[in-house]
Image (cartoon, grey):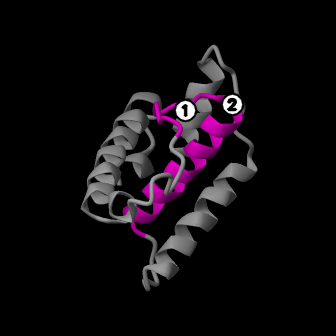
């Protein structure tokens, strides 16, 4: 995702750079999510959450996401189930597929995007 994101942003009209430190941040968030999930290894689900949080911050800061993520204030209506329950998991699966497609489009030769 990191490589695909850098490539897409470099060629986009918006031109928002991806800091080199973003890779470290994405990794740290994914590791933290794995730990919160009581796992010793990071799985794709952890990476997807890290990417979503990163892209949400890009939307908040620059108004644009390379995976077309829309601004989404968290817990805005008190309906925790829609943010943490079944609906949340469905949305995360959909975002996971979007991220895979994005990586395939912008970094097809990078194996880690497909795993």
Asked if residue 70 lies in the magenta stretch, the reply is yes
- Relative image position of residue 6 (x, y in whole percent): 62, 34
Q: Tell how many labels.
A: 2
Q: Left or right: 112 with respect to 62?
A: left
Query: Magenta stretch mostly in which secondary structure?
Result: helix
| Identity of the residue drawn at 39% across and 64% down | 80
User: Could you tell me if the residues under marks 2 and 1 are in contact, i.e. CB atoms within 8 Å?
Assistant: no
Residue at (42%, 47%) from the top-left corner? 113
Region in magenta:
43-71
Residue 79 higher or lower than 111, as above or below: below
Quadrant in which the C terminus appears:
bottom left
What is the residue that sits farthest to the top in this orientation?
Answer: 13
Give me the disc on residue 2.
none
Depth check, front residue: 96 or 63: 63
Task: From the top left corner, tell me how far across and down residue 81 is, in percent.
Answer: 33, 64
- x, y percentage for residue 70? 48, 34
Q: Element type at marker 2? A: helix
Q: Residues within 10 Å of mark 1 (few under 14, many from 20)?
A: many
x and y percentages locating residue 109 in the rendered image: 42, 37
Tell me the distance, in whole angstroms, between the alpha carbons under discs 2 and 1.
Answer: 8 Å
Label 2: how many Cα within 10 Å (few below 14, some 14–19, many 20+): few
Residue closer to the observer: 1 or 54: 54
Can you say whether 32 is above or below 85 in the image? below
Q: Is residue 84 left or right of residue 29?
A: left
Circle 1: element type: loop
> Is residue 112 depicted above or below 30 in this figure?
above
User: Considering depth in this image, is 70 or 106 the residue closer to the camera?
Assistant: 70
Find disc 1 in the rendering and name its residue. 65
Identify the mark at residue 62; answer none if there is no mark: 2
Foreground residue among 109 and 97? 97
């Amino acid at each position: 995702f990191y490589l695909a994101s850098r490539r897409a942003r470099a060629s986009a009209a918006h031109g928002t750079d991806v800091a080199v430190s973003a890779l470290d941040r994405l990794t740290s968030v994914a590791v933290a999510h794995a730990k919160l999930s009581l796992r010793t290894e990071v799985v794709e689900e952890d990476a997807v959450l890290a990417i979503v949080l990163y892209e949400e911050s890009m939307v908040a800061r620059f108004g644009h996401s390379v995976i077309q993520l829309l601004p989404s204030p968290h817990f805005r209506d008190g309906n925790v189930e829609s943010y943490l329950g079944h609906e949340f998991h469905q949305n995360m699966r959909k975002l996971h597929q979007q991220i895979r497609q994005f990586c395939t489009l912008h970094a097809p030769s990078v194996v880690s995007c497909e795993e």
